[in-house]
Image: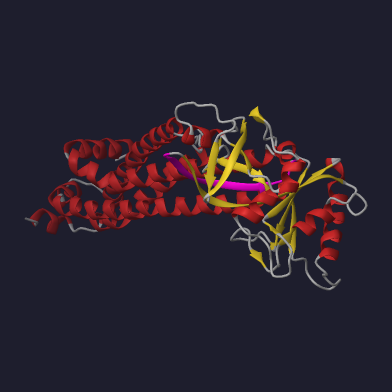
Amino acid sequence: MNFWENFRIALNGLVINKLRSLLTMLGIIIGVAAVITLVSVGRSVEGVVTAEFQGLGNNLLFILPGQISPDQQGPRRAGGAGLTMNDVVALSDPLLVPEVEKVVPEYGRSALVTRGRHEMRTTITGTSVDYSDVRSFYPVTGNFFNEQDVASGARVAVIGQTVYEELFPDGEPPLGATLRINSVNFRVIGLLEEKGGSGFNDQDNLILVPISTAQSRLFPARRPDGKLRVDFIYAQLLDEDRQDAAIGQIELALREQHNIDFDEEDDFTVLSQDELVSAFSQVTSVLTIFLGVIAGISLLVGGIGIMNIMLVSVTERTREIGLRKAVGAKRRDILWQFLVEAMVLALMGGVIGLLIGMVGTLIISNLSDSLQPVVDWTAVIGAIAVSAVVGLSFGVYPAARAAQLNPIDALRYE
C-alpha cells in the first residue's frame, strides 16, 4: 500500500470521527496559534523599541548611572552613586567636552495630577530648556519654559496631548489653566505636538516642568552631600562622526567629577543609540523566545493527545488490523497507516492553528495603534515543522504496537 492510499484512509477516518478528531487536534491548534501570535507580537515590540530609539537621531549619547553590561539576560545595572547636576555642568563645559553641543538632564517621577474634578496619574519630567530641541518635543500651542523659569524654579508646565485629552475633555484652551501636581499648583504654558505611542509607552502622556522645580518642589532630589541627583543625561553631539571622541571626553570628565582612580571601574555608562537599541532588543528577543516556548508547551500536550487517541484507535481496530494482515498486508503497511493518520492529525491541527494565529495577529494590529504585529514566517514554518515532528514522534508507538499484532490473535479480539 502506498503513501497516498494511507493518506486517503487517514482522511476518511478523520471525517467519520469528526468531533473526536477535532478534540484530538485541539492541543496542536492552540499551540500553533499561540506560537504564531505571541512571536509576531514579540517581533513587533522589538521593531517598536528600535524605531523609538532611532527616532531620537544618530547624534545622541545617553549617560546612565551605574554599569550596564549587556549579557544573556539583558542589561544589568550595578554600582554607582548616581548622576548629579554637577555632572551636567561639567559636561556642558566646552573646554572639557568640546565635541558635545547640548547637555540635557532628566529627573522625574509618576504623580497624581488634578484639574477640577478631572484627575490622572502621569509622568512628571523635570528637564532643561534644550530638551525641546534635543528630543524634538515642540509646543503646538504656547511656549516651552525658558532659562529664567529654570533659574527661578517657576511652577510652569508643558503638557502632552494625552494629558490634555484627559484633563480637558471638553476641549477648553489649556494655556493659563492651573494643574495640581502632588498638591502643588502649576500653570500650563504650552501644549506639545502629538508624538504618538511607542509600544507600551505613550510619549504624549507626560508633563514637562523646569528641572529645578521638580527637584525642589515635587520630588526632593538633594543628596546628603548637597548635590542634586538626576536620573540620566542626554548629550547631543556636534558631529555624529566624532562619536568615539565624544564618548572618551565624557568618560574622562565624569571620572574626574566622581573622583574615580585610574584602576577603578566607571560608576556610570555612556551608551550610543546603537548600543541602547541592541541592549533593549536583546531583552525583547529573550522575552519573545520565552513566550514562544511557553506557547510551544501546548504542542507537547497536543502530541500526548494524539498518542492517546491513536492507542484507542489501535484497540478499536484490532480486528481490522488482523483482517488486513490475513489478506497479505505487511508490518510496514500497518506501521505506515497509523503513522500517516497521526501526522495528518498533527498537520491539519497545525494548518488550522496557523489560520487562527494569522487572524489573531490581524485583530491585534487593528486594535492597537502602536503595536502592528506581522506574521513571522519563520515562526510559521517552525510551528508547522514541529507539528509534523510531534505527529511522527507521538504516532510511532501506537503504529508500532499495531504493526506487531499477531493476525490470529487480532481476528479473535472481541
Q: Quadrant of the N terminus?
A: top left
In the picture, measured across the screen, residue 307 lies left or right of residue 211, that is left
**Which residues lie in the magenta part?**
117-129
Front-most of 276 and 204? Answer: 204
Front-most of 154 and 401? Answer: 154
Residue 157 picture location, percent across and down: 62, 40
In the picture, measured across the screen, residue 120 lies left or right of residue 61, that is left
Q: Is residue 122 magenta?
A: yes
Residue 111 picture location, percent across and down: 52, 50
Q: Place residue 14 in its image quadrant.
A: top left
Q: Residue at x 68, y 63 (%)?
A: 222
In the picture, measured across the screen, residue 383 lies left or right of residue 310, that is right
Chief SS of the magenta region? strand
Image: 368 above or below 74: above
Q: Is residue 223 magenta?
A: no
Residue 353 picture location, percent across and down: 36, 39
Front-most of 219 and 80? Answer: 219
Q: Residue at x 53, y 41 (%)?
A: 179
